[in-house]
């Protein structure tokens, strides 16, 4: 589809990314799903192509516009492997985002630069067993002790958690979740090396996104040097709420790419499958369902690209990020359900692309903020009127 957002250079870049993914990812991605993780060498390959820091400053190998990232994320989404998408996007757009944005020069040199080269793997550890979307309820503590913080608590659902060399961890450094009713003032972000004494991690077996190496990470009196603080003390809530907007836009863009690929697969199946003397692509029932999905895809594409454009203009389009995430990830679920149904038993085979899409799509309406929270944020802003933009305390 022609678009005002993409230049000829973007399309050249798209072809390059697609060729790279076809050569280096697609042949082995199904095996990585079964192995519950990506191989170490893959990170290096992504890093060599410059794909792990596109949105960061040019001094660390980025300096590209938002639409270069949109192209990359759409293509990553088109692979159809949710675990791979999550692993790479958490590393390149979520965990390292905070280091690039407000990290000290030393933190950028020690953690960001190796991560952009693919020499190290990053995770983002916010969620806890008792608090996920409710950031104000986080209870993992970092207590000052000389020139260190002592970290205690448990993080869960950490993508890349099993393989990450370091994690950006949301910790409570100020008022406790009990003493501060809002729970918003005392959060900070710390970079924590994964091999520090007192850290233990265990795999979390999930329905989909299998190659993301998801983990529960326990911090038991972990001593972290005080200079690993990212940005200002007790400003973590502010950083996270802003960072979550990018997280949602990234999630929406990945979903968009996945929807395009799944629709291509479905159309291919319908054209090739003969039932009662004619191909399914000539029967009205499946074709009308495809018509609805293609129409919704066209709407989703405009919403995501418009949101990316606003972001590229330096805005923080919180409502649009929530709408884009809500609409695309729920559309991916509707499509996955329809596609599996229209492919009959072929779609129901465990190793089929349709079955994997069905499993993977469910994760995206939860991670980076459940649909219910997106509706809350959009609804509250809508009731305030067009001028009432603002992010809430949930993700
Ligand atoms: C595959 C996967 C990968 C993930 N990766 C990471 C990661 O790398 N790092 C990380 O920190 N976290 C990660 N997460 C965690 C994710 O961000 C949380 O699952 C999410 O924020 C929701 O938190 P929760 O699961 O604790 O659900 P809760 O916050 O307990 O909510 C449970 C349910 O309650 C409903 N709900 C919540 N709030 C509201 C509301 N305001 N109104 C109405 N209903 C509501 C929703 O249906 C929600 O699904 C991942 C999650 C998944 C599924």
Image (cartoon, rainbow, N blue to C red):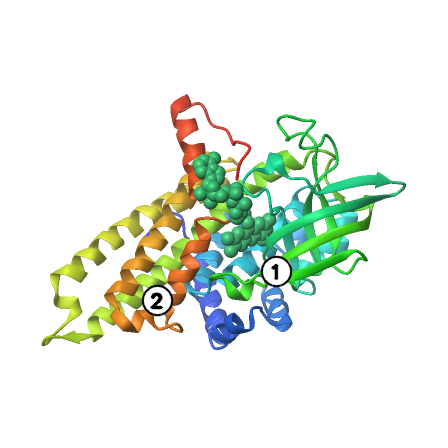
Label 2, label 1: how many angstroms apart (C-alpha)? 24 Å
Residues at discs 2 and 1 in contact (Cβ within 8 Å): no
Name the element at disc 2: helix
> Ligand 1 within 8 A of label 1's CB?
yes
User: Is residue 138 left or right of 110 when viewed as pictured?
Assistant: left
**Extreme residue in the left direction:** 277
Q: Which residue is mark 2?
A: 354
Residue appearing at x 51%, y 65% in the figure: 210
Residue appearing at x 39%, y 54% in the figure: 256
**Extreme residue in the right direction:** 146
Name the element at disc 1: loop
Q: Is residue 41 above or below residue 243?
A: below
Label drawn at residue 160: 1
Residue appearing at x 67%, y 55% in the figure: 217
Residue appearing at x 30%, y 46% in the figure: 299
Q: Residues within 10 Å of mark 2 (few under 14, many from 20)?
A: many
220 or 149: which is nearer to us? Answer: 220
Tell me where residue 265 appears, x and y as whole percent. Answer: 31, 68
321 or 164: which is nearer to us? Answer: 164
């Amino acid at each position: 589809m022609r678009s005002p957002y993409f230049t000829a250079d973007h399309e050249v870049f798209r072809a390059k990314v697609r060729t790279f993914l076809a050569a280096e990812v697609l042949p082995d991605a199904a095996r990585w799903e079964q192995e519950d993780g990506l191989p170490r060498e893959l990170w290096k390959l992504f890093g060599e192509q410059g794909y792990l820091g596109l949105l960061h400053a040019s001094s660390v190998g980025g300096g590209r516009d938002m639409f270069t990232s949109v192209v990359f994320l759409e293509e990553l989404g088109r692979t159809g492997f949710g675990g791979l998408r999550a692993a790479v996007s958490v590393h390149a757009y979520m965990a390292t985002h905070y280091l690039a944005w407000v990290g000290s020069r030393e933190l950028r040199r020690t953690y960001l630069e190796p991560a952009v080269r693919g020499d190290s793997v990053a995770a983002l550890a916010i969620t806890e067993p008792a608090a996920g979307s409710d950031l104000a309820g986080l209870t993992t503590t970092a207590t000052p002790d000389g020139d260190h913080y002592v970290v205690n608590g448990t993080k869960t659902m950490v993508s890349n958690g099993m393989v990450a060399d370091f994690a950006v961890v949301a910790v409570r450094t100020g008022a406790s979740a009990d003493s501060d009713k809002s729970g918003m003032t005392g959060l900070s972000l710390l970079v924590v090396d994964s091999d520090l004494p007192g850290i233990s991690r265990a795999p979390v077996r999930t329905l989909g996104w299998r190659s993301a190496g998801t983990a529960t990470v326990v911090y038991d009196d972990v001593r972290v040097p005080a200079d690993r603080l990212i940005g200002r003390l007790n400003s973590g809530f502010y950083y996270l709420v802003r960072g979550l907007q990018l997280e949602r836009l990234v999630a929406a863009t990945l979903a968009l790419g996945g929807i395009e690929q799944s629709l291509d697969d479905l159309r291919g199946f319908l054209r090739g499958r003969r039932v009662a003397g004619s191909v399914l692509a000539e029967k009205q029932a499946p074709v009308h369902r495809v018509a609805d999905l293609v129409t919704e895809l066209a709407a989703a594409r405009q919403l995501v690209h418009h949101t990316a454009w606003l972001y590229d203009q330096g805005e923080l389009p919180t409502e649009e990020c929530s709408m884009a995430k809500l609409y695309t990830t729920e559309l991916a679920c509707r499509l996955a359900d329809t596609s599996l149904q229209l492919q009959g038993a072929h779609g129901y085979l465990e190793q089929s692309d349709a079955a994997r899409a069905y499993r993977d799509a469910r994760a995206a309406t939860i991670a980076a903020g459940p649909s219910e929270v997106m509706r809350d944020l959009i609804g509250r802003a809508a009731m305030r009127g067009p001028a009432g933009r603002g992010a809430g305390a949930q993700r």
